[in-house]
Image (cartoon, rainbow, N blue to C red):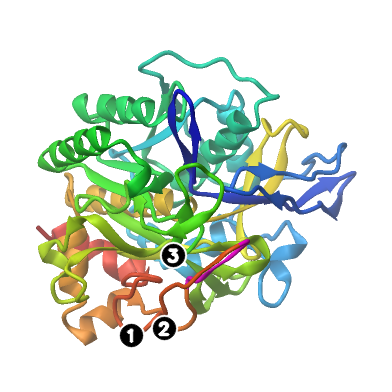
Amino acid sequence: MLTRRRAGRTTRFAGTLTGLTALVAGAIVPLAAPAVAAGGMTPAIGVHPDAKVVGQATGRDGTVLFGCQVTTPAGCYGPDQIRAAYGVDKLANFGLDGRGRTIVIVDAFQSPTIQHDLDTFDALWGLPDATVNIIAPQGLTPFDQNDANQTGWAGEITLDVEWAHAIAPKARLDLVLAKSNDDADILAATRFAVDHSLGDVISQSFGEAEQCMDPALLKAQHRLFQQATRKGITLLASAGDQGSAQPTCDGTSFFKAASTPATDPNVTAVGGTILDADGTTGAYHSETTWNEPAFQAAGGGGYSVLYREPAYQVFSQRSHMRAVPDVSYNAAIIGGVLAVWSSSGQGADLVFRFGGTSAGSPQWAGLVALADQARHGRVGMINDTLYALSLSRHTYNAVFHDVTTGDNTYHGDVTVPGFAATRGWDAATGLGTPKADRLVPILAISR
């Protein structure tokens, strides 16, 4: 997730994506899959040059648009299916849709088509319209379609905005954009969001090995997160997409490391699973640890070398150091989520399949917005509550899908041994994935 430049370090988003399907002259056509770039998840997307979306969903009646949704197991999911799999649809029956709350999404550079893409996404899936409030504290960097780094971040923006909205469709969306993905610029954008208390929850779909971030910036980041927590702001971050590994600080290889900002004890770190659910109805079947060696991708997890074990983790693991992830969410590439992205350089209104723990952080942010709505106020840092719920086996099983199979070993040019999923918390999938209809009401009344 990190590359080093002479001017300083650069944070990479924690996501990966594949060109999937688009409607061409009314027919569903598969698109070529990309290569995964060495040293990170910067996508190289293969897309049919004249592919375009020409159809829309007609209401919220379970309509399925793409062939990958009806394979066994499902090869992709739309909002209806993910909402059903994790119980978000049941919350909607009680009027929980995020209204009155604000989700802050921190990203870098920009996507000039994000409002159009969200509008198209909403029309495609029958979601309510929403406005993306773009905030660029350092000024909006002009978009360079020929810069692969900027294009990759545009894809990240697409995923973050559309899928936070899919979970909390009436929540306000504040997209705070750093002028670049240098650590100092990302931190400055986050500081603006915290100082101005822009929203109730902040989603951060990026990271790098703790050892690679400048120590002074790490300390400043930690102080900022403490400030956010005191204001009742919930902080979320993706745990990473190379399993137990992170790119080395010079970007030439991988080593065993955990990702910041996910490891900060004020943050809820989101790892990855492979969801097996019905691609038409969304009926939940099972989950396993996200690990797709063909893509050199797996759910981030491991142990901090900087932060001691926080009080909320004392009864969960015995390393005496902060451990991640705290929770997980579907992050599969084959079995990923669909999003509309027009700034890829491959054409307008294309539908892509996205994978990675980047998909989980904004969706957990959506869940927090639902809890904030139910509470009529901010729920604040949720880690204490999440881990307290795991102390009773009965309660834990009621609110989480406990993921007990697989591991997050990194399989790339080097192999970095990972951690196995077990009963309860583990460094592969954390506490597991949410049964949202049961967990969100508890988050709303806790603290």
Q: Tell me residue 17's x, y (percent).
A: 63, 50
Quadrant holding the C terminus: bottom left
Using residue 156 as the reference point, say whether residue 187 is left or right of it.
left
Q: Are marks 3 and 2 in contact (CB under 8 Å)?
A: no
| Residue at x 56%, y 47% (from the top left corner) | 252
In the depicted view, which residue is nearer to us: 203 or 5?
5
Q: Which mark is residue 299?
A: none
Q: Earlier in the sequence, mark 3 or mark 1?
A: 3
Kindly identify the amino acid type of the residue bearing the numbered disc 3: Ser
Q: Are marks 1 and 2 in contact (CB under 8 Å)?
A: yes
Circle 3: element type: loop
Write down the residue under mark 3.
244
Q: Tell me residue 23's x, y (percent).
A: 81, 47
Could you tell me what secondary structure mostly forms the magenta stretch?
loop
Q: Tell me residue 212's x, y (percent).
A: 37, 43
| Residue at x 47%, y 64% (from the top left corner) | 243
Q: Which mark is residue 423?
A: 1
Q: Choose mark 3 or mark 1, whichever is in front.
A: 3
- The magenta segment: 408-413
Q: Residues within 10 Å of mark 1 (few under 14, many from 20)?
A: few
Circle 2: element type: loop
| Residue at x 54%, y 75% (from the top left corner) | 283
| Residue at x 25%, y 28% (from the top left corner) | 191
Kindly identify the amino acid type of the residue bearing the numbered disc 2: Thr
Using residue 87 as the reference point, say whether residue 315 is left or right of it.
left
Write down the residue under mark 2.
404
Kindly identify the amino acid type of the residue bearing the numbered disc 1: Arg
Q: Verify whether residue 303 appears in magenta.
A: no
In the depicted view, which residue is nearer to us: 5 or 276?
5
The Cα–Cα distance between marks 3 and 1, rounded to whole angstroms, is: 19 Å
Q: Choose mark 3 or mark 2, whichever is in front.
A: 3
